[in-house]
């Protein structure tokens, strides 16, 4: 509904006289009227069942008036609503509308996504991860490697589509998978070696194309190698400990709980923006919820899942996870804003792409790995 249907000034004719007085050419008022004029100055009959203001009829109400010069002049001198004492020479205030304005419908908060699909996909992914994690460790390493390759494909595709940056996918995918496996088999040393070889492969692979854009392409390729597969190797390194599956489960649980706490508290109580230029939907109240939920979950996980862990260590771990997960989420939001996109992909209904789920997990992995090594050792 446009504004003209509610506050427009009255027009001469059917809706009442103008405040400027009679229009030039109108028949004069007074006893000089003959019978013909008197016939045209009789009170307007009440129109039956006139729609209330605000409907589609209001926008076209001018079309319902009679047209033509003689009718226009006669109706302008008519007494409004049958008032015989009306003087057409004096300006008249417009008749206020007595129709009540409809109450505005209450606005409901929305998550902006298909919540049912998001929950279904999340439960399905969680089942696959937990099953592979506690059945065969090597299968879980394979799941991580596949997620890394898909994430690299999404990232390089968006870079090329939005910025024209051609980071070479083939060496990134092969080197990324090798990085995850090396981190599981050889630890941090193997991960660093695989990272260096992947960066070298990116430099060499790009030499097969024209030199224009070489620097930005290889720079983006090295960044992608570090951002996705190298950070993911810390998940594989967590798995090598005796209680490795429980360490990985703790890492996943704390990250998910942090995101859930931020969403739940921010959606219900969020009023103060956390970083409006980067991610307008995030609030300080949401960050408080992330910290509170993650610290509580961290205390429980360290006390009951991690060998030799204590609850106070879990409080520190939860606080660190909430901070790193939030920064990771903001970091990917910064990338997406620079690219001018909402999601990195559409592979996961209700979530976006794989990278939209890895954004908070990737930077959190080295933080959890390091704190667990400091608290209870690498064993």
Image (spheres, rainbow, N blue to C red):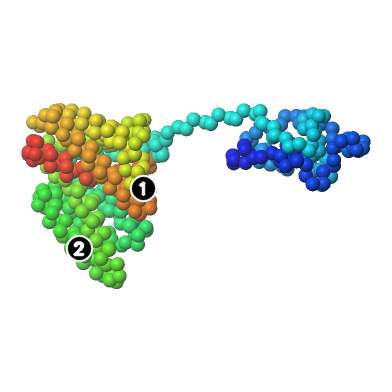
| Residue at 8 percent of width and 36 percent of height | 376
Quarter assignment of residue 261: top left
Q: CA distance from mark 2 to mark 1?
A: 29 Å
Ranked by sequence position, the earlier of labels 2 and 1 is 2
Q: Is residue 215 above or below residue 311?
A: below
Q: Is residue 206 above or below residue 195?
A: below
On screen, residue 336 versus residue 26, left or right, reads left
On screen, residue 47 versus residue 113, left or right, reads right
Say which of marks 2 and 1 sits in front: 1
| Residue at 35 percent of width and 60 percent of height | 163
Q: Position of residue 350 (x, y in %)?
A: 38, 40
Q: Is residue 206 above or below residue 267?
A: below
Residue 278 seen in this snapshot: yes
| Residue at 21 percent of width and 28 percent of height | 296
Q: Residue furthest bottom?
A: 210
> Which element type, helix, strand or loop, lies under badge 1?
loop
> Which element type, helix, strand or loop, lies under badge 2?
helix
Closer-to-camera residue (137/54)? 54
Decide: few, some or many residues near mark 1? Use Cα within 10 Å; few <14, some 14-19, many ≥20: some
Q: Is residue 181 above or below residue 377?
A: below
Quarter assignment of residue 98: top right
Closer-to-camera residue (268/167)? 268
Closer-to-camera residue (320/22)? 22
Q: Position of residue 95 (x, y in %)?
A: 69, 32
Q: Position of residue 341 (x, y in %)?
A: 38, 51
Instruction: Find disc 1 in the rendering and name its residue.
Output: 343
Instruction: Find disc 2 in the rendering and name its residue.
Output: 201
Q: Residue furthest right?
A: 35
Q: Position of residue 31 (x, y in %)?
A: 90, 35
On screen, residue 202 versus residue 16, left or right, reads left
């Amino acid at each position: 509904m446009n504004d003209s249907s509610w506050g427009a000034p009255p027009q001469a004719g059917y809706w009442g006289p103008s405040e400027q007085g009679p229009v030039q050419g109108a028949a004069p008022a007074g006893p000089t009227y003959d019978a013909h004029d008197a016939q045209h100055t009789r009170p307007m009959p009440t129109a039956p069942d006139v729609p209330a203001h605000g409907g589609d009829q209001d926008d076209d109400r001018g079309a319902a008036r009679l047209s033509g010069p003689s009718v226009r002049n006669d109706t302008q001198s008519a007494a409004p609503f049958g008032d015989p004492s009306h003087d057409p020479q004096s300006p008249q205030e417009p008749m206020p509308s007595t129709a009540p304005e409809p109450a505005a419908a209450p606005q409901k908060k929305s998550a902006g996504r298909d919540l049912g699909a998001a929950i279904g996909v999340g439960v399905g992914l969680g089942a696959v991860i937990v099953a592979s994690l506690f059945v065969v460790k090597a299968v879980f390493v394979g799941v991580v490697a596949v997620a890394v390759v898909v994430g690299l494909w999404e990232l390089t595709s968006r870079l090329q589509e939005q910025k024209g940056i051609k980071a070479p996918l083939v060496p990134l995918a092969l080197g990324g998978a090798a990085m995850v496996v090396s981190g599981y088999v050889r630890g941090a040393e193997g991960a660093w070696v695989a990272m260096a070889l992947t960066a070298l492969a990116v430099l060499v692979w790009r030499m097969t194309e024209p030199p224009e854009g070489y620097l930005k392409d290889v720079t983006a390729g090295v960044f992608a190698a570090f951002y996705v597969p190298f950070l993911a190797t810390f998940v594989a390194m967590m798995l090598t400990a005796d209680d490795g599956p429980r360490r990985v489960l703790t890492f996943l649980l704390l990250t998910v709980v942090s995101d859930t706490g931020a969403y739940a508290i921010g959606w219900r109580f969020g009023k103060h923006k956390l970083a409006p230029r980067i991610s307008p939907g995030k609030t300080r109240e949401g960050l408080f919820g992330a910290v509170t939920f993650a610290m509580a979950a961290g205390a429980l996980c360290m006390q009951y899942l991690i060998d030799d862990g204590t609850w106070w260590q879990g409080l520190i771990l939860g606080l660190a996870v909430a901070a790193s997960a939030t920064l990771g989420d903001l970091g990917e939001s910064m990338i997406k804003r620079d690219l001018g996109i909402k999601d990195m992909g559409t592979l996961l209904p209700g979530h976006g792409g794989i990278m939209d789920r890895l954004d908070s997990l990737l930077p959190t992995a080295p933080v959890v790995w390091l704190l667990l090594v400091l608290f209870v050792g690498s064993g």
